[in-house]
Amino acid sequence: MDDDVKASMHKHRHTTLERLEKYISENHFQDVNLRGKLYPFSKEIDRLYHWSMPDGQGAWEQWSFRQVITQDFRPANIGESFGPLWSTHWFRIEVTIPDSWKGQQVWLRWNSQAEAMLWSMNGEPLQGLSPSGPHQRMKRDITNGFNSDNDEDTKMETNNHNNICTENGLPNQMRTDYPISRCWNGSQETLVYYIEMACNNMFGSGKDGMINPPDTERTFRLEMAEVCTMDADVYKLIMDLEVLHDMAKWLPKDDPRSYEALYAGNQIINTILKSDYRLASKIANTFFSKGNGARAHTLALIGNCHIDSAWLWPYSEAKRKCARSWISTLNLMEEYPEMRFACSQAQQFSWMKTHYPAVFEKIRAQVAAGRFIPTGGTWVEMDGLIPSGESFIRQFLYGQLFYQREFGVQCKDFWLPDTFGYCAQFPQICKQFGITRFLTQKLSWNMINKFPHNNFIWEGLDGTTILAHFPPGNSYEMNVKVEEAMRTVKNLQDKGRVSTSAFLYGYGNGGGGPTKEMLERARRLKDVDGCPRMEHMSPNSFFKRLESEKQNLCRWVGELFLELHNGTYTSQANTKRQNRECEFALRDAELMLALAAVGGELNEGKLHAYQDALVGAWKKVLLNQFHDVIPGSSIGLVYREADQMFQEALALATQIKESCSALILQDKAEARQGESVIVNTFPWKVQQVVSVNEDNLEPTRKRVRMEGEVTQATRTGGHYFAVEAQGIGWTKLSPMCPAPVSVRVSNGVYVLENSLIRAEIGKYGQVLSLTSASDPARDVFKKRDGHQGHGNQMMMYDDIPLYWDAWDTMDYHLETAKVLNDEHSGCVMTEMKVIESGPLIVKLQWEMRISKVSSITQEIELSAVSPYLTFSNHVNWHENRKFLKVAFNTGLLTRNATFDTQFGYIERPTHTNTSWDSARFEVCGHKWADLSEHDFGVSVLNDSKYGWTARGSTLTLSLLRSPKAPDEYCDMGSHTFRYALMPHKGSLQSAGVQRRAYEFNNSLMVSSTTLSEDKDTWYSLVGDGAMIEAVKLAEDKTGDVVVRVYEMEGGSPKVWLKVPSTPRPRSAYLCSGLEGPYKELSFSVEEASKHLFIALSLSPFKIVNVRISYG
Ligand SMILES: [Zn+2]
């Protein structure tokens, strides 16, 4: 009858929309709607047995499936609760399928409010299961809710949409089911499965469902354990109706296509109610077959599952999240051949290889098929700001090597959707590893300024460019909903320049990645008039398409600064300190190992064992650089694991450094008594005061006496010596006789002076005056109006953010500044004491109670040869949402401050002219920052800090925060850190600020030698402006040495790499980051020293890798 397919009356848009919605709702009218018909028959499983794994968090790693299933399983019931948080529970389920279900689709359904893995009775992981429920969904909204657009309307729209999704009863697509059979064979055998329940869920288990410290008391209730039949026709129609509803709702109201969708949906309901499923389905098919015109924008559908390697859960749980998510993804791949899945952290693949070899083999097959796609090229998705340049190199090196070795592929795309800022050297580092494209999303979270592009050419610090893309949908967890597709095109800021945008879909963090529903929607929306076109693509295919349009794109130069999460430069201070220590310790250890190897000091077995051990140590450090660990945004449990790993890495690096240097410095031919020796691992001459213990002093003492003993006893019974050491190399201890450093006290002012600088310090530690001996009339702290500013002002701020405690410090915290070490602060201070008084070291000490619960002890030190004042701090810290900083309120007039960064430095404004300038109120810098006028300036160096503020003439270093979530004990307890203040004449480059900052972080090493020579140099540089960042054995274990040099002063200097001639190298090549040689270099020989020289061509901030072969 024709009447059946006509609208029978005037249609009201809103009521019709809601009719569609209610007809497929999970929450309303299920007894009569279509959703209620999805599972026509069900029964609870017949028998349920339970065994609780002892020992809680991480215990699962010690158990094999075979061991587990032989444990004492006891009967259990649906409705029981299991816990506590982080514990593991195993279930054995037994069920027989009713005879009458023959020929039907049969599914298993399980909801235990916790993440779970379904296993076959043979120990094969079958499917990840994640809990469903509105509660779960609410938490998702917390993390995804910050839209980005700085457009209030859009923000509201997005948030509302997320809520409506739950409220209106559209299905909540967590994963609670598993297809036992698509067509049940009628067998009466008892089916047996095992389920491993991990007592946590997608966002760990924060108190009140928020990003809070975990609720360790929490238990998880087994709500559902059943088998059921599933009606495939009903499923199809539900999906059809959902997409029609969404098109009707989200297409522009003045688009006739919106009404076509509405009427088609309405008509389908009427048809279903007449039980004509076939016709209903046909109406939908007809609607979806009406394609787009050629002008439609294309969305590149890239499946993904963003799994934080640790965050609101420990590392051990992330491993299981990967397994659960990826087995589910692999299952979907069988059903949906069009699907492409991008996966980005080599570490996570490596976990699979170790803990889930069967899953890893399936992955390997899909990698070969080009469908499970390793991407990103890095070991983990690391923090983009805090790791050193060499750490970033290692992230790519060990990532790419893993992919090459395991899968025979190399990533071409850098994939870092979720990090809190992006260093300006990423383009150059990427290109060193064959990566020319970059994808991220987080910059859309900017608080103040909207980043102006989604697609652009990103030019880094050295001028290298890569192609960058930010998915305009502002999420890497899309559900393939019509609204998201429309939003993606609406948000695209490069309209008319590009025709394709990435669309990243799949639940992250234990949600299990893409779902069947997402893929069903994608099939319907592939090419439908009114919606953007959808095409499944690999990242590579997407970027290829973008590359064909890159001539249309704009260019962005320098760092990508995220205007949010600036507290992460400071939170979890000890983790950051350990990371810095490990970076330096690993550098020295690799250098010593390379020297020992080239010198033939180690047999092959030992050599390779050491080399592997150092790679293992690096990987621990790299893992802790994950984008929620080193920034300080994880739960406390993670930091206990990270601490342990850092300690292991540090101990190993120290041990290898010491045993290799002992081998190198030992005379095997002749037995001599050991003499003190100074080892300098920097490629320049270093002057420092070192302390030497009595016990290895005897032969040294004789030399010293002969030359006129210039020593000072240390407080621990040793001796200070001022020494000068050539780099990179060693020099027997041969004290210099510098002009003494002195301390005088007059009127409560302490005057510290050596031949380089002079400082006046008040009784509570404030620096009242600071001059450089080469320009004694210029006082760093003298203001233009004649007033005197002060340095080393200990500052306290209220630090209560708007959103995420550990992540954010807001600009208004600057308005709450309070100077602590001031007469009128109310803090209890002990007056300054002179504890060492020269001639080599002068040291003052003072103490302050910051509050009832916190205190600082500070030592202020100047050595006879140091161009900077050192401040060593011991802080006992128990504050709540307070921020401790140290300020240097100088008299300098400068519009830019300069900050140390990976392989170079960057400048940022000291003013707040524009909203972009003002948003950079707290910025990231590494070992130093500097304020300079044309020929004079001051630098602040540090050994473990990353947060800075430069406003006007004041430079402030961030020291400690005290956020309470997600780690309620974040930074509570004792801290040790140092910073230094260095006035300089000339530029920071001519004053050697960068070199001093390296030295400040890694003092000369005092060791012992039996060699007869007085000194020697190893790999070194001739010429200024460059640094040897690494000397390491090549990863391919050929015994070749890779020397990584970079230009650090922003110039194009002439530099020669000096190489020892014994043993004589066979050849030298320029090589890539992956250490593959590409251009031969020639040696020149210096007749006198027999050293070899390799000329290097450098330009500002360029990284050059030289591979030297000895074989
Ligand atoms: Zn993340």
Image (spheres, rainbow, N blue to C red):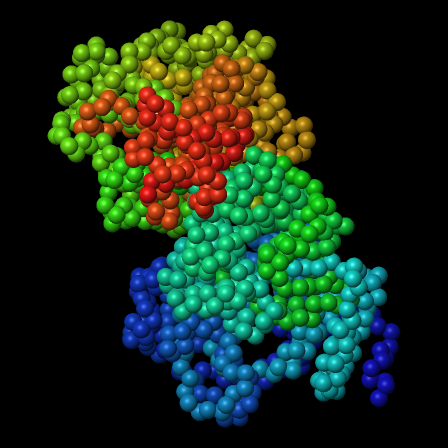
Where does residue 672 sit, x and y in percent of width and height? 13, 27
Where does residue 978 sit, x and y in percent of width and height? 39, 28
In what quadrant of the picture does the N terminus appear?
bottom right
Query: Is residue 744 left or right of 18 when viewed as pictured?
Result: left
Does residue 566 appear anywhere in the picture? no
Q: Residue at x 40, y 59 (%)?
A: 351
Between 917 and 406, the one lying in front of the other is: 406
Does residue 695 appear anywhere in the picture? yes
Residue 543 vertical placement versus 630 (above, below): below
Residue 795 vertical placement versus 705 (above, below): below
Residue 573 vertical placement versus 202 (above, below): above
Where does residue 1095 sit, x and y in percent of width and height? 46, 29
In what quadrant of the picture does the C terminus appear?
top left
Report the residue that reaches farthest toward the bottom. 99
Between 797 and 308, the one lying in front of the other is: 308
Q: Residue at x 50, y 54 (%)?
A: 410
Where does residue 809 sit, x and y in percent of width and height? 54, 38
Q: Residue at x 21, y 10 (%)?
A: 708
Query: Is residue 925 left or right of 6 when viewed as pictured?
Result: left
Which quadrant of the structure image shows residue 585? top left
Q: Residue at x 50, y 21 (%)?
A: 988
Query: Is residue 316 left or right of 1063 when viewed as pictured?
Result: right
Between 838 and 796, the one lying in front of the other is: 838
